[in-house]
Amino acid sequence: MIDVPLLGPIPFSVGILCFPISYIFGDILTEVYGYGRDSRVVGAGFAALAFASFMAWVVVNLPPGPSGNMKTYQPALDMKAHAGNHRPWIRNCLTS
């Protein structure tokens, strides 16, 4: 939510900024390099996003290491435990 003068709080999404910027970059790529290279860039971007998502999933789902340090950080990495509420695990990480 952003507070706009005279209108009050308005919901604001990052997509409002990302879509026009990505559209401009795509348009410039198409105009300068053509449709063929533009589609290769878009495909490479999707492949990189899929790879990064897969690696993030692998890292989060790996079991903790045997050292005590990893057991301290594991609650912060466990996405299922806090399900959107970050305050309890931040407090636990700071106090342990």
Image: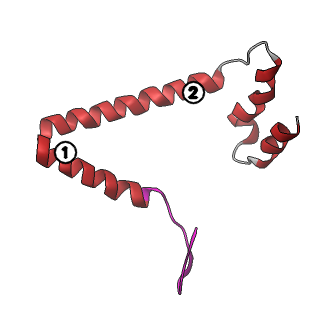
Which residue matches tag 1? 29
Choose between 32 and 62: the one closer to the eye. 32
Residue visible at 73% across and 18% down? 64
Q: CA distance from mark 2 to mark 1?
A: 31 Å
Residue lying furthest bottom in this view?
Answer: 6
Which residue matches tag 2? 57
Give the SS element for disc 2.
Answer: helix
**Drawn side of residue 56 relative to residue 28, left or right:** right
* The image quarter in which residue 74 lies: top right
Choose between 43 and 66: the one closer to the eye. 66
Q: How many marks?
A: 2
Residue 83 badge:
none
Residue type for callout 1: Leu
Sequence-wise first label, 2 or 1 = 1
Residue lying furthest right in this view?
Answer: 95
Give the SS element for disc 1.
Answer: helix
**Neighbour tally class for label 1: few under 14, some 14-19, many 20 plus, Cα within 10 Å:** some
* The image quarter in which residue 48 lies: top left
- Magenta residues, as a range? 1-15
Residue 32: x, y in percent? 12, 45
* The image quarter in which residue 94 lies: top right
Magenta-drawn stretch contains 91: no
